[in-house]
Amino acid sequence: MGKYQQKTMMIGGGILFGLLLILAHFKMIDLYVQSVIMFIGVNIIFATSLSIVNGYMGEFSCGHAGFMAVGAYVSSLLTVVLFTVDKETGLAILPASMSIYLFPVIIIIGGIAAGIAGLLIAIPSFKTRDDYLAIITIAVNFIIITALNNMDFVGGSRGYMGMKKVIYGMEGVMKFPYMLFWVITFAIFTVFLIRRFITSTYGKGIIAIKQDEVAAEIMSVDTNHMKLVAFMFSSGLAGISGGLFAHVIGYVNPGSFSILKSTEGLVMVYLAGMGSLSGSVISAILFTILLELLRPLQIFKWVIIPLILILVMQFRPEGLMGDKELSDYFPKLKKFYKFK
Amino acid sequence: MSLLKITDLTQRFGGLTAVSDLQLNLEEGGLYGLIGPNGAGKTTIFNMVSGFYTPTEGTINFDGNVINGKKPHTVTALGIGRTFQNIRLWHDMTVLDNIRLSQHYHLGYSVFEPFLRTKNYFKNEKRIEEKSMELLGVFNLQDIAHEYPKNLPYGIQRRVEIARALAAEPKLLLLDEPAAGLSSADVSDLIDHIRWIHDNFDITILMIEHQMEVIMNLCQYIKVIDFGKTIAEGTPAEIQKNPQVIKAYLGDEGEVYA
């Protein structure tokens, strides 16, 4: 890995990112295209975080959207209560100018809340594995959705809104494409964190669990501890993606975090290949674009997407990338970025 | 000094008694053999010592600690290494990573440091890597450090597995049928290899083996079990002559199949 190339990449990426923000700021990019870019960012966080548990650790969690919901509701509730005038919660507690600085903090708090929820679920769930874990996580997804449906202070099944007001408040202080900035920043941050985790000897413990759990335990890997940490980390990041998702759309309802959303995550991870970080990023990008392209088909897109999954499983069961990273296919990329 | 002292160890699975009233005393630095016909309970004993099973009765005392009921990774950290009957390497991880991960109990950094990449993190990762390479060097495996175990010949995989078990710096090494599936040339290599490990590492070895060549060549003291009970123990010469052992392995003289 060359230092020079790495610097080039960082500067190049920075310039691209800056250019994107400037174009967005001066409304030179269509709002629709902007929102697609933001969804791509949200999905990158969602897919890569799920790939920690389902890809690297080889367990099967099916309720990832549940943690996304926790993050989305916690952060939305916080921003709306703190920064806007609301019928139920009254006047804004903090001035809108502070929302600019506190926004990322609140998104992270949403992530922490989801992480804690993940830990609470992981403690009893990881006494079982494989199919049983899948069933438990599906149940958890339903429990979270049902609970949200019955919580009146977040709107129940009508959903919760007001996040747009927060964003307008932020823009009122200073014009800037905040959401675009934060979504992309958090997406980069997520990939960065996961890569750091997975390349350390500590984090490789979860890959050992996937390949042979008995051997991992006997070779001094505390498998129970690693599972809890990985699940907490994964659900925390899902919470961050949820918080961003809520603020991008400006409206959340329990339905948007149903089992269908979890399935989307699974499709992205299995399409990508289990245990490939660059694969998850690529498949999140492709999948989001595909979803948008298939939008005119309405409900029929849910015929085509599972069909793609079936075809991939038939002809390339390890996923598009398997456990390879982009640099394994294009070794020259290693100079720019250390993938593993 | 006694390193491992097992007293009155019993393991029942429902109505089945896999091991009953086992006594075992391993002196530090010895090379011990555990033999017996299939289903005698040998691997069950290994599973109890390494923490996979909690014994129904009895105590396992290792180096001054009672270890029954402790989890396998804690037992490993206390100093018991183990290999498996069927090789259990992490096949999709390089040999170097295999060795590296066996030091998981002693990383020297906290949970957050991989994310923060602190000085301490790099220092310890470097230490682990150097130690792993050194160990591979000792085993003359440094050339395959970046290979995947699944691509290696069986005999080499065995050696990698033994090296991996030693990476955790055990005081006691449990070898579960190390010669299983090896060709006769590989077996004689293995015998030299185990003897060499025993001489060069300050270690006590207890092994299960069916190939008498390995056991009789290596072990100083042998314990024979059948149906979970000890039927004989002694030096290789004594065991070979013991009528009960011959009976357990070959059946009664009365029922010779002509």
Image: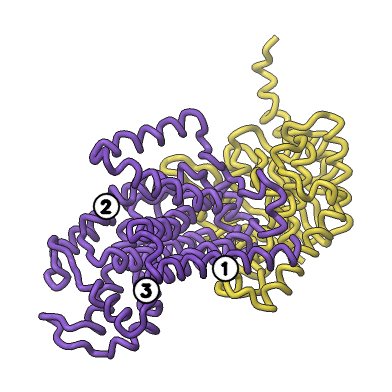
| Location of residue B109 (image quadrant) | bottom right
Q: Residue at x 83, y 39 (%)?
A: B216
- What is the x, y in percent for residue A29? 40, 61
The residue sitting at 73% across, 74% down in the picture is B123
> Which chain is mark 1 on?
A
Height in image: B233 above or below A78? above
What is chain A's hue in the picture? purple
Q: Is residue A91 above or below residue A175?
A: below
Comparing labels 1 and 2, the label whose residue is closer to the camera = 1
Residue A329, percent across and down?
A: 66, 43
Give me the disc on residue A107: 3
**Among the two numbered marks 1 and 2 on one chain, the one whose residue lies closer to the N terminus:** 1
In the picture of the structure, the residue carrying the numbered disc 2 is A139
Q: Nearer the viewer, mark 1 or mark 3?
A: 1
Q: What is the secondary structure assignment of the residue under circle 2?
A: helix
Badge 2: residue crowd in 10 Å (few <14, some 14–19, many ≥20): some
The x, y position of residue A176, in whole percent, is: 39, 76
- Identify the residue under disc 1: A15
Q: Residues within 10 Å of mark 3 (few under 14, many from 20)?
A: many
Instruction: Judge from the rendering whether residue A151 lies leftward or rightward of residue A250; answer left or right.
Output: left
3 or 2: tag closer to the N-terminus: 3
The yellow-coloured chain is labelled: B
The 10 Å Cα crowd at callout 1, few under 14, some 14 to 19, many 20 or more, is few
Chain of the residue under the numbered disc 2 shown in the image: A
Q: How many marks?
A: 3
Q: Label 3: chain?
A: A
Q: Quadrant of residue B125?
A: bottom right
